[in-house]
Image: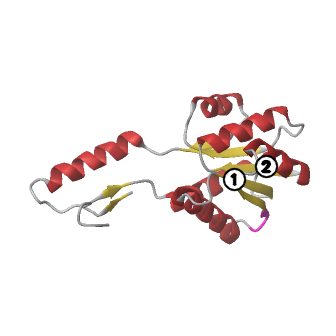
Amino acid sequence: QNDLVSAACATNNHTAGAEAAKKLSQAIEDTGKIAIMAHQGTAQSSIDRVAGFTEEITNNHPNITIVETIFENDEDTVEDLVAGVLEAHPDLAGYFCTNESMSNKTLDVLNTAENTTIQIVGFDSGEMQQNAVTEGREYGMICQNPFGMGYASMVAAARLSPHLPVDSYIS
């Protein structure tokens, strides 16, 4: 918050990560090993989504174990990272992917993997993910609401013009 910004409209990424954990838990019937494939470890959205997901699993799903939390890096391709997790954990039940790119790359690896029963909950809603949900290769995804965010931002701007009060953070 600063003097130039009166209101911010954004996704609460911590809450979104927790919701993803609840959905993945449903998909694997609340038991098994899961992994997280996260985008950049320095991106606040990634950090918050992983934290919300991890806290929900740790606090409320005792029969689920997060075996790997991997952030995208410059040394390895996402595909190699996912393949390494699958090799190390052949009984993996689920994957949480923190954005569209991570979801798509994980789906690419799972398309060629022997274990096709791994459930995925992704983030965002690209065409590849939508097709994967339709085909049963992705359980679902957490989506932001760009229309709602834009609308709420415009309402806040309209209220600010005549100096009416607005919330400083609109989720």
In-image side of 75 versus 157 (left or right): right
Marks 1 and 2 in Cβ contact (< 8 Å) = yes
Q: Which residues are magenta?
A: 62-66
Q: Residues within 10 Å of mark 2 (few under 14, many from 20)?
A: some
Q: Where does the image place residue 105, in percent across and percent down from the top left?
A: 71, 39
- Residue type at tag 1: Asn
Whether residue 155 is situated above or below residue 15 in the rendered picture: above
Q: Quadrant of residue 150?
A: top left
Please name the residue shown 13% across and 60% down the image: 164
Q: Is residue 63 magenta?
A: yes
Secondary structure, mark 1, is loop
The reply to whether the magenta stretch includes residue 32 is: no
Q: Residue at x 63, y 34 (%)?
A: 129
Image quarter in which the N terminus is found: bottom left
Residue under numbered circle 1: 73
Cα–Cα gap, marks 1 and 2: 9 Å
Q: Circle 1: is it few (<14), some (14-19), or many (20+) Cα within 10 Å?
A: few
Find residue 98 and report its horizontal and vertical position in percent: 62, 50
* Residue placed most toward the observer, 164 or 39: 39
Which of the two residues, 96 or 2, is positioned nearer the viewer here? 2
Instruction: Establish if 111 lies above or below 26.
Output: above
Which residue is most to the front?
A: 75
Residue at x 77% of width, y 55% of height: 34
Kindly identify which residue carries mark 2: 81
Q: Amino acid at mark 2?
A: Leu
Circle nearer the N terminus (1, 2): 1
Residue drawn at x 55%, y 37% as measured from the top left: 125
Q: Is residue 93 visible?
A: yes
Q: Main secondary structure of the magenta part?
A: strand
Q: Quadrant of residue 68?
A: bottom right
